[in-house]
Amino acid sequence: MDDQIEDELRAAARGYNEPPETPREVMWERIVAARAEEAERAEGRFRGFRSVRPVRLAAGIAAVLVLGIGLGRLTVRQPGPGPAPTPVSKAAPANAAAYRLATTEHLSQAEAFLTLFRVSVRGSGDERLATATARQLLATNRLLLDSPAASDTRIRLLLQDLELVLAEIAQLSSQPRSGELDLITEGMEQGGLLSRLRTAVPAGASSTQGVL
Amino acid sequence: MEERELIGRVLAGDPSAERALYDAHVDRVFRLVYRMAGDLDRAQDYTQETFIRAFSRLAEFRSEAALSTWLGSIAISITLNGLRKVRRLNQRELVLDDLAPVGRVERLADPDLKTRLTQAIEGLPEGYRAVFVMHDVEGYTHEEIAGVLGVHPGTSKAQLSRARARLRVALADFAKD
């Protein structure tokens, strides 16, 4: 194929599926409507989450933690006189599994809460309910940070970052100033907190629905 | 206004910033999507979905790439997935025309180069077609294409070269005339 044909080819290619003028307004109206609908659905889910979750959430996570700690205490042998004990304990896997379960559950709930908080709380006037949930999550977060679950550096850093954001939400005033919510959102975004939470929670783990 | 500042305002919930971001990018996204889809309704649907998804995931955007590249990758992903669905549907429904292309094709009794080329482009494999449309039709650079498609620039160049070679073969008899 000679150069002339190549040139014709290029010129003809520019006419391939020639787009009409962009229908900006039509598309924008649909985008706005779709996003409003999505936000409304998310707010509905958030209301349900807030109305039943705080007490059940704390109770459920506490139960898992108690189970883990109980299993650990029952099965770990007390060190006695004699040769130095080997660091490997047969109880470790069961104990670690219980902590892992509690951590996963907590991170899953935190991810659901923060996602819904970001979508729903702004301008809804329901900050008080959000702060109550944040306080419950904060308490569990502190328990997990002090537990062997935090021996995993990645989880420990995640729990520490989560603690900062939860503390900010827990301290929200009933009528927050305009900048307060922005600061919280920024805090969530700066460290990619939500993405890290999603990565840490295995697919299929419960979030807004589940064992609690 | 700088792009980073605009993104910050969108994330803070400023509706005017959302509109400004949309206005800044919608033409480029729509053009690319329309070129790939070849149909106004589908192009509108895919463009809308691109921005809906982009706004809901903007917090995950990292400034290592340009926002236009990020939007392009969302648009291409949505468009190719949408076209695959349409193709599957067509294959189920249209037994007689099992090679029917997804986009608009004008069939003429005595096709000129433009029509022949359109048919030949529609017949390209998906990846080749995307690279050809982006580079030769819409004028993207290989670096931009690589960012949008998530491939190495060298891969983009190779795919373009293969796409052009296929088109030359498809139009060989035209060249002889």
Image (cartoon, rainbow, N blue to C red):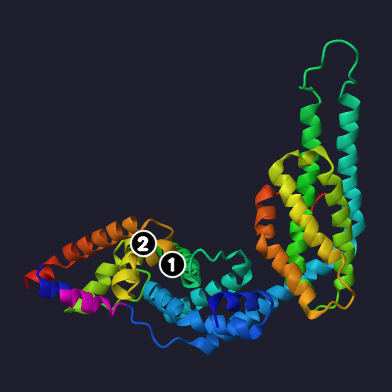
Does the residue at mark 2 contact the one at mark 1 (Cβ under 8 Å)?
yes
Q: Is residue A15 magenta?
A: yes
Q: Position of residue A41 (x, y in %)?
A: 73, 72
User: Quarter of the image holding residue B121?
Assistant: bottom left
Q: Is residue B96 visible?
A: no
Residue receiving disc 1: B83
Q: Nearer the viewer, mark 2 or mark 1?
A: 2
Nearest the camera: A99 or A168?
A168
Residue A134 in percent (x, y) is at: 85, 61
Residue B11 can be seen, yes or no: yes
Callout 1 amino acid: Leu
Name the residue carrying label 2.
B126
Q: Amino acid at mark 2?
A: Glu
Mark 2 nearby-residue class (10 Å; few <14, some 14–19, many ≥20): some
Chain for disc number 1: B
| Residue situated furthest left in the rendering | B177
Query: What residue is at 41 percent from the left and 88 percent from the top?
Result: A21
* SS at badge 1: helix
Left or right of residue B89: residue A119: right
Q: Quadrant of the N terminus of chain B?
A: bottom right
Are the numbered discs 2 and 1 placed on the same chain, yes or no?
Answer: yes
Q: Is residue A105 above or below residue B2?
A: above
Q: Position of residue B98 (x, y in %)?
A: 34, 63
Decide whether the magenta segment is chiefly helix, strand or loop.
Answer: helix
Is A3 placed left or right of B33 in the picture? left
Location of residue A13 by image quarter: bottom left
Image-based side of B114 in relation to B31, left or right: left
Query: Within the magenta stretch, is there residue B96?
Result: no
Q: Nearer the viewer, residue A128 or A146?
A: A146
Which segment is the magenta one?
A: A7-16
